[in-house]
Image (cartoon, rainbow, N blue to C red):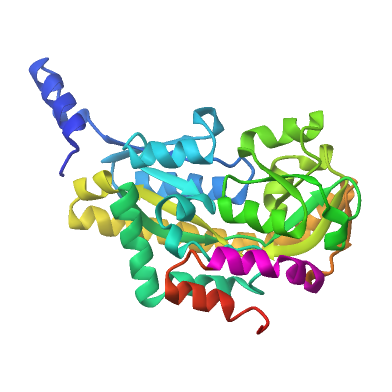
Amino acid sequence: MRRTPVFAALIAGTALAGAPLAAAAEDIAIALHVDPGHVMFDVGERMKEMLEERSDGEFTVTLLGTEVGGERDQIEGTSFGEYQITLGGSMPMTLYAPEYAASDLPFVYDSVDEAREIYEGETGDAVRQAFIDNGRLRLVGLSERNPRNLTSNEPMPTPEDVQDLRLRVPEIAPWVTIWSGIGASPSPIAWPEVYTSLQTGVIEAQENPVNLIAAGKLFEVQDVINRTEHVYSFFHWLMSEDFYQSLDEDQREMVQSTIDEAIAWGDEQTAQLEEELYTMLQDEGMEVVEADKAAYRAAADAAIREVAEGYAPEVRDYVLSFLPEQ
């Protein structure tokens, strides 16, 4: 088994001390920016169990949560080799493959399949190479997400309702542009700070899929789910390129097949749980309001076109194909 340089040095030191080398195991740290109870945390736990079992003791796996930081902290830590695997939301694309970061544009797609096209064919190959070149990260899997919805303390079924709304969005520049174009006042805030920011009134609203709304207990600080369903997107499973290169072919195949199986299981859970989560959130006191999606899309049109001009030509044209002709 090939080892990372740091690990090899540790092994050498242990050998000099007279300890048996057979007792050593490679440690894989998986960093997750979601809370326990979220489906993606369950996927991480499933990966841990299967990796440890299938490696026959070669690997020990540690799950790390928000105690090591928010999404950006964890992604950058994996890029630097601090963690071996991490879970990213939409942020990794804007950080490391910005010319292709259109799979999660708000108010563009009607389904996860339409969004997935960005990762297929030659464009998908370019995305994966950009992650390696720009972030020393390897994209090893995509987990489907429930569509994102706007939560607030008052119903907001139309874009007129969000004018000057202090809205939390992730640290993703195109999202700031699009929500600003609709008329809101978006603020990029890391996920671990969202609950407190809502509780203290720093922000008035936020947007996320129902599973993250539930796992983060946002029903305690928000009254309404506005079903805007404005983003269909994915969680990105990323591996440190240095760690990947340290594995031999058999290990790579075992690790990748394990990740694939855990993701497939998670996709099934995500689809099955969506309506149950809406019911649970209503039971917790949240009102579910159907939003005028067509009106929101019309309000976002100009900002989407502005953002699309910054993409690679083939991605720009794909995004514009979903907008009304001008």
Name the quarter where the C terminus is drawn. bottom right
Queried whether the magenta region covers residue 101, the answer comes back as: no
Asked if residue 98 is positioned above or below residue 218 in the image, the reply reads: below
Residue lying at the far bottom of the rendered structure: 325
Looking at the magenta stretch, what is its main secondary structure? helix
Asked if residue 280 is positioned above or below residue 20 in the image, the reply reads: below
Q: Residue at x 18, y 24 (%)?
A: 10
The answer to whether residue 188 is left or right of residue 139 is: right
Question: Closer to the camera, 306 or 209?
Answer: 306
The answer to whether residue 131 is left or right of residue 150 is: left
Q: Which residue is drawn at 44% across and 76% down?
A: 314
Q: Which residue is drawn at 28% across and 53% down?
A: 133
The answer to whether residue 153 is left or right of residue 172 is: right
Q: Residue at x 79, y 70 (%)?
A: 293
Q: Is residue 2 visible?
A: yes
Image coordinates for residue 194, horizontal then vertical, percent: 69, 37
Magenta stretch bounds: 294-308
Image coordinates for residue 79, horizontal then vertical, percent: 35, 42
